[in-house]
């Protein structure tokens, strides 16, 4: 019941002879090689949602086995008892056997009714939304996710939201309300239960939960465009106390003010104003950073970018202590800022290398930023960090990965 997607990138490693062709292909497309395992499990019993579905399935499978055995017995019994004899005599006729005909109608009706009772009971359990439960608003867009905490008002104004990384408490069902800002997406983090379509103008609420703290893989499960497969997210399940503390820190958070003359300060200026002389659009027109005037909603919230360990809706991960200062991760961040539509097909983020990219079928020319300017923006983004004690990755085991977040 596990599926694992492996991605190779960035560094050298040994590949067996059988894998040589695939490796050559991979190397041609990508440079280097570091493995990012994306592991999901629909049979994760640490979620009450999954346990409910599991027990319903077991009953349905058990009933199916009983039906199979019953039908097989009836078949073999009939074949053996009423088989053609050697004398060519007419077999016994039972046309008009009312008892048999009634049984043949009633028994299947009882079976179907029994199965439907099981299904309806489970539907009622998994769709039972508790009004007292913590709420998370999920917005899917081409090709990223935003997670909002409607009960958590930020001291700096607005509601706490985080792009592509969702935190939730352990051992406490959470009411998730899913919608879409454009086409239909699918919210699917099977370890914490269930799957729902994210539809524009429709809000669907249901409960998800997990007893076990850890970081779980989420994917978009509805074909939604060029980067459907690059529309991932992480669900980080935290112990109750840690969850509350983290959310409190997020509420209190204001983006740090960069020291005058620093790379962060230059990056901040570019982030807020862009570089109109070259047509480079301001990041702030599409992204929100809590505690600044950046309030764009066309792209994911970047308030805690420095704490986040996924980039480009999870197509890159930096699960080490150094995360975005790690050499390879820094190169990925640089490439992302420079020309996101090149590294992620269909990305609506502008190119900053002066190249052209497609927006709704129309070719648009991006502005130009120098590599130094891009690095300044990266430095500013890295500085957007929650206090160390609110780093939800620190020590968090990552599902399917050998290491915890925050430990190399
Ligand atoms: Cu969004 Cu597939």
Image (tube, rainbow, N blue to C red):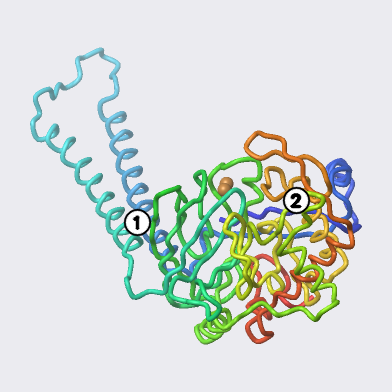
Find residue 278 and report its horizontal and vertical position in percent: 82, 50
Residue 40, label in figure: none
Q: In which quarter of the image is the N terminus?
A: bottom right
| Residue 262 as seen in the image, left or right of residue 364 | right
Q: Does the residue labelled 1 lie within 8 Å of ligand 1?
A: no
Residue that numbered label 1 is attached to: 59
Along the line of sight, which residue is nearer the eye, 250 or 351? 351
Give the residue displayed 28% in from the left and 50% down from the top.
115
Q: How many numbered marks have been drawn onto this rendered protein structure?
A: 2
How far apart marks 2 and 1 lie (CA) works out to 49 Å
Give the residue displayed 79% in from the left and 56% down from the top.
275
> Is 264 above or below relative to 4?
below
Find residue 7 and report its horizontal and vertical position in percent: 75, 53
Along the line of sight, which residue is nearer the eye, 229 or 371? 371
Along the line of sight, which residue is nearer the eye, 25 or 219? 219
| Residue 65 as seen in the image, left or right of residue 15 | left
Secondary structure under badge 2?
Answer: helix
Q: Does the residue labelled 2 lie within 8 Å of ligand 1?
A: no
| Residue 330 as seen in the image, left or right of residue 394 | right
Q: Mark 2: few, some, or many residues within 10 Å (few <14, many ≥20)? A: many
Residue that numbered label 2 is attached to: 340
Secondary structure under badge 1?
Answer: helix
Give the residue displayed 47% in from the left and 51% down from the top.
198
Find residue 291 and report its horizontal and vertical position in percent: 61, 76
Q: In which quarter of the image is residue 50?
A: bottom left
Find residue 235 and report its horizontal and vertical position in percent: 57, 67
In the picture as drawn, the residue positioned furthest to the top comes out as 88
Along the line of sight, which residue is nearer the eye, 63 or 53? 53
| Residue 382 as seen in the image, left or right of residue 286 | right
First in residue order: circle 2 vs circle 1 = 1
Q: Mark 1: few, some, or many residues within 10 Å (few <14, many ≥20)? A: some
């Amino acid at each position: 019941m596990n599926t694992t997607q492996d991605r190779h990138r960035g560094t050298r490693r040994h590949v067996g002879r059988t894998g040589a062709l695939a490796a050559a292909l991979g190397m041609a497309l990508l440079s280097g090689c570091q493995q990012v395992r994306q592991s999901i499990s629909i049979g994760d019993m640490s979620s009450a949602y999954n346990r409910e579905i599991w027990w319903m399935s077991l009953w349905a499978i058990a009933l199916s086995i009983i039906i199979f055995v019953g039908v097989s017995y009836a078949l073999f019994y009939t074949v053996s008892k009423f088989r053609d004899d050697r004398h060519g005599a007419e077999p016994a006729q039972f046309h008009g056997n009312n008892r048999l005909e009634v049984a043949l109608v009633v028994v299947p009706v009882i079976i179907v009714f029994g199965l439907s009772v099981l299904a309806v009971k489970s539907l009622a359990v998994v769709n039972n939304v508790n009004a007292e439960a913590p709420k998370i608003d999920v917005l899917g867009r081409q090709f990223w996710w935003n997670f909002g905490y409607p009960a958590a008002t930020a001291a700096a104004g607005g509601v706490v939201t985080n792009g592509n990384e969702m935190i939730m408490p352990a051992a406490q069902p959470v009411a998730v309300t899913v919608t879409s800002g454009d086409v239909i997406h699918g919210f699917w983090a099977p370890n914490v239960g269930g799957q729902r379509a994210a539809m524009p103008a429709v809000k669907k609420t249901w409960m998800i939960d997990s007893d076990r703290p850890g970081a779980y893989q989420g994917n978009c499960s509805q074909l939604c465009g060029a980067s459907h497969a690059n529309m991932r997210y992480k669900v980080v399940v935290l112990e109750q106390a840690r969850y509350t503390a983290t959310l409190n820190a997020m509420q209190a958070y204001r983006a740090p003010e960069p020291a005058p003359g620093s790379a962060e300060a230059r990056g901040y200026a570019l982030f807020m104003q862009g570089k109109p002389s070259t047509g480079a659009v301001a990041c702030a027109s599409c992204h929100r950073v809590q505690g600044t005037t950046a309030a764009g909603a066309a792209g994911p919230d970047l308030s805690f970018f420095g704490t986040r360990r996924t980039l480009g809706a999870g197509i890159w991960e930096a699960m080490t202590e150094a995360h975005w200062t790690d050499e390879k991760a820094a190169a990925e961040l640089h490439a992302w800022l420079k020309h996101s539509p090149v590294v992620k097909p269909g990305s609506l983020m502008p190119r900053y290398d002066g190249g052209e990219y497609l927006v709704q079928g129309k070719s648009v020319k991006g502005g130009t930023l120098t590599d130094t300017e891009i690095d300044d923006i990266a430095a500013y983004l890295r500085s957007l960090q929650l206090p160390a004690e609110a780093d939800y990755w620190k020590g968090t085991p990552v599902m399917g990965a050998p290491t915890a977040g925050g430990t190399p």
